[in-house]
Each structure stands twice: as C-alpha cells, then as structure tokens.
C-alpha cells in the first residue's frame, strides 16, 4: 500500500539537505579511517614481504571500518577497542599456514615469529589510527 506524503516544503528540504550532508560526511570519514588503517598496516608489514603487506592491508581496511563505527557507538570503551584489535588479529591468524612438523622447538619459534609478523602491523595501525584521531579531536575548539 502506498501512503500519501505531503509535498516537501522549503523548511523540510533544508533539514533533509543538512541530514544528507551529515551522512555524506560520516561516509567520507569512515572511508578515510579505513584507508588510513589499511595503508599504515600495509606499509608497516612491507619489509616482511609483499604477500604479508597485502594481507595486512586487507585486515587494516576491515579494522578501520569497524573501528570508526565502534567509535561512533561508544567512544569511551577502550576495552571494546582493544577487543576489536584482538579480533582482527585473530582473523589475520586464520590465514596463516601452520608450521610442520609440530615436533620441535623450531616449529614453536616459527609459529611465534609468524604471529608477531602478522599481528604487529595491525597493532601499529590501530595505535596510529587512534593517536591521529585523538590528536585531531584535541585540536578542535
């Protein structure tokens, strides 16, 4: 069923235009957060190889999008922010190959090294993203 809608008045169009401008601004900021997180994670992991950089960039983009929306929902919950970094590091770990054979200490050392190489760029990206966000919000009047 189609409901009757009254014609848009000048006052209504101004409010709707402002609302649409605000939504466009939020979309732009969300994309900027994702790009900043993705590019920084990729650049941090570039010394470990191109494949590592591409994987870290993808996880960083995903982290940036989620972090922006989490920041909008509850900016004061640092435990939730840290949990998000841990969750994205966990997602990053799912794509890592397991060292074979599992027998010796070399396999455990290899696993720890792989986890550090995979997680450090994402942790660095999160620190850079939130440091930048705090710096920019502190500079506003």
Image (spheres, grey):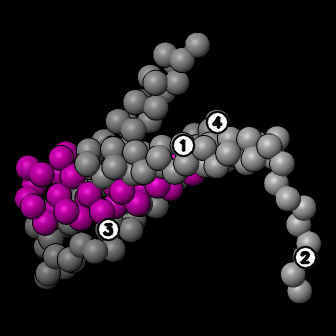
The image quadrant of residue 76 is top right
Q: Does the magenta stretch include residue 63?
A: yes
Q: Mark 1 points at which residue?
A: 25
Q: How far apart are marks 3 and 4 (CA)?
A: 28 Å
Q: Dot 3: within a 10 Å radius of its alpha carbon, few (fewer than 14), some, or many (20 or more) residues? A: some
Q: Look at the numbered discs 1 and 2 and tell me whether their residues touch, using CB distance below 8 Å.
A: no
Q: Earlier in the sequence, mark 2 or mark 4?
A: 2
Q: Name the residue under label 2.
A: 3
Q: Distance between the residues labelled 1 and 4?
A: 22 Å
Residue 9 spot, x, y in % from top left: 83, 48
Q: Quarter of the image for the C terminus: give it.
A: top right
Q: Nearer the viewer, mark 2 or mark 4?
A: 2
Q: Name the residue under label 4.
A: 76
Q: Name the residue under label 3.
A: 93
Q: Earlier in the sequence, mark 1 or mark 2?
A: 2
Secondary structure category for the residue under label 4: loop
Q: Which of marks 3 and 4 is nearer the N terminus?
A: 4
Q: Dot 2: within a 10 Å radius of its alpha carbon, few (fewer than 14), some, or many (20 or more) residues? A: few
- 116 left or right of 18 in image: left
Q: Look at the numbered discs 1 and 3 and tell me whether their residues touch, using CB distance below 8 Å.
A: no
Q: Dot 4: within a 10 Å radius of its alpha carbon, few (fewer than 14), some, or many (20 or more) residues? A: few
Q: Earlier in the sequence, mark 1 or mark 4?
A: 1
Q: Distance between the residues labelled 2 and 4?
A: 42 Å
Q: Look at the numbered discs 1 and 4 and tell me whether their residues touch, using CB distance below 8 Å.
A: no
At a point 13% along the width and 66% down the height, the residue shown is: 51
Secondary structure category for the residue under label 1: helix
Boundaries of the magenta span = 42-70
């Amino acid at each position: 069923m189609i409901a009757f809608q009254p014609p848009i008045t000048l006052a209504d169009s101004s409010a709707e235009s402002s609302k649409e401008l605000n939504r466009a601004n939020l979309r732009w900021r969300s994309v900027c957060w994702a790009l900043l997180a993705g590019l920084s994670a990729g650049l941090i992991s570039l010394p470990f190889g191109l494949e590592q950089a591409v994987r870290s960039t993808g996880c960083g983009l995903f982290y940036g999008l989620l972090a922006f929306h989490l920041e909008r929902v509850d900016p004061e919950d640092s435990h939730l922010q840290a949990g998000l970094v841990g969750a994205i590091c966990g997602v990053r770990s799912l794509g890592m190959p397991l060292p074979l054979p599992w027998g010796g200490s070399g396999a455990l050392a290899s696993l720890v090294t792989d986890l550090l190489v995979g997680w450090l760029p994402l942790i660095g990206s999160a620190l850079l993203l939130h440091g930048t966000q705090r710096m920019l919000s502190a500079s506003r009047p």
